[in-house]
Amino acid sequence: TRFELTHVDRLSAGLQYLAQGGAADVVLLDLRLPDSEGLETLAAVRRRGPRVPSVVLTASDDETLALQTLQQGAQDYLVKAYVQVYHNLLGRSIRYAIERARAERLKDEFVNTVSHELRTPLSTIQEFTGILFDQISGPLTNDQQDYLAIIKSNIGRLTRMIDNLLDMAKIEAGHALLSKEVVEIAAVVGHTAQTMRPLAK
């Protein structure tokens, strides 16, 4: 497999290349550069090009550093001495990083498409359920009101699931912040029990 290589000798030059829209399928990164050293080098590249996979290529055979590098988002950690011995190692790592990045982009596109396509029919169901529940089209029995309340509740649940899918895509892309809050567990369990009661009967 043939690759086209664009080489820069400083982190600042590499970041400038990415900022200017430089085409890169993968970044080969040494953690020791004249103007940067250590994991912050990887972090800077990830901030500037979050969608571009990074393969760390370094002289350090440090297992702890390798693990930390992968935890911070690098696709692979290669030691230069091993690459010189195993000639196919670098090419295989680059191909894997590119293929994985493409698969992740396809997954994100799929999630976005499915999520948006689900919103339209769900909005229609929600609108007509509201009309029935408000008895605009005629009176309802108590049982019918209970059933519609369950339908409305599950519409809300589906809406939250779609929102969660979109949120996960944003989180994986590094474009979202998590907001945690305390919830009353009894209300959650009660809601689930009410939803499942007709099926249990």
Image (spheres, rainbow, N blue to C red):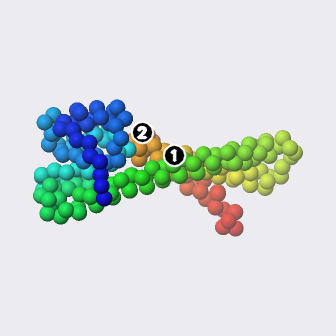
Dividing the picture into quadrants, the one containing residue 84 is bottom left
> Which quarter of the rendered picture does the C terminus lie within?
bottom right
* Front position in the image: 138 or 94: 94
- Which residue in the structure is indicated by mark 1? 166
Q: Residue at x 20, y 56 (%)?
A: 78
Q: Residue at x 69, y 48 (%)?
A: 121
> How many numbered discs, if any?
2
Q: Residue at x 28, y 61 (%)?
A: 92
Helix, strand, or loop for circle 2?
loop
Q: Point out the residue furthest to the bottom here.
A: 201
Amino acid, disc 1:
Leu
Mark 2, residues whose alpha carbon is within 10 Å: few (<14), some, or many (≥20)?
Answer: few
> Which quarter of the rendered picture does the N terminus lie within?
bottom left
* Front position in the image: 94 or 169: 94
Query: Would residue 143 be found to the left or right of residue 1 on screen?
Result: right
Note whether 92 is above or below 69 in the view shown: below
Q: CA distance from mark 2 to mark 1?
A: 11 Å
Q: Residue at x 23, y 33 (%)?
A: 13
Dividing the picture into quadrants, the one containing residue 76 is bottom left
Note whether 116 is above or below 14 in the view shown: below
- Which residue in the structure is indicated by mark 2? 175
Residue 156 visible in rendering: no
Q: Point out the residue furthest to the right here.
A: 138
Residue 53 coordinates in the image, percent (x, y): 33, 48
Amino acid, disc 2:
His
Marks 2/1 in contact by CB < 8 Å: the verdict is no
* Front position in the image: 198 or 184: 198
Mark 2 or 1, nearer chain start: 1
Dividing the picture into quadrants, the one containing residue 200 is bottom right
